[in-house]
Amino acid sequence: MSIDWAALGQVFGISLVVTVGFVGVFTLGILGTSRKPQRAEAGTDTAATASAAPAGGAFGPARAGAYLCFALCAAAVAYGINLIVARTSERVPARRPWHVLLGTLTQGGAFAS
């Protein structure tokens, strides 16, 4: 048994980079959704500062970026599940009815004598 160390190292390196990137994008999403509006300073009119805020809210772009980060994470997870399911379906043969399977086994299949 020989081990292809170059391929193993390549898988390790790519896995490390993708994992760190995935965690970083998810962290940016958490950061974007956890932003809270700053309190108005003492002595200022809160109605004037509220009317000066953009229509999307003070943190509209941050929240939109956070949702984009979460969408990227969901897409990465869906792609990974797709890869796993596609590989599994290639290796597992289609299920056959029992009578077809038993007929195959008795007519020269694995258990024929």
Image (tube, rainbow, N blue to C red):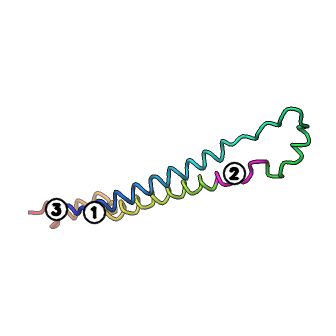
Residue 8 picture location, percent across and down = 28, 60
Residues at circles 2 and 1 in contact by the CB criterion of under 8 Å? no
Residue to which mark 2 is pinned: 62
Q: Quadrant of residue 94?
A: bottom left
Which numbered tag is attached to residue 47?
Answer: none
The secondary element bearing badge 3 is classed as loop
Relative height, residue 9 to residue 39 (above, below) = below
Residue 78 place in picture, x, y as percent: 50, 57
Q: Is residue 68 left or right of residue 112?
A: right
Residue sticking out furthest to the top: 42
Q: Within the image, what quadrant is residue 96 found in? A: bottom left
Earlier along the polypeptide chain: callout 3 or callout 1?
3
Where does label 1 land, which residue? 100
Question: Counting other residues with Cα less than 10 Å from the Cα at mark 1, is it few (<14), some (14-19), or many (20 or more)?
Answer: few
> For the stretch drawn in magenta, what is the main secondary structure?
helix
Q: Amino acid at mark 3?
A: Ser
- The amino acid type found where label 2 is placed reads Ala
Assess whether mark 2 and mark 3 are in contact (beta carbons under 8 angstroms).
Answer: no
Quadrant of the image containing the C terminus: bottom left
Percent x, y of residue 18: 45, 57
* Mark 2 Cα shell of 10 Å, populated few (<14), some (14-19), many (≥20): some
Residue for badge 3: 2
Real-space Cα separation, disc 2 to disc 1, in angstroms: 60 Å
Q: Is residue 17 magenta?
A: no
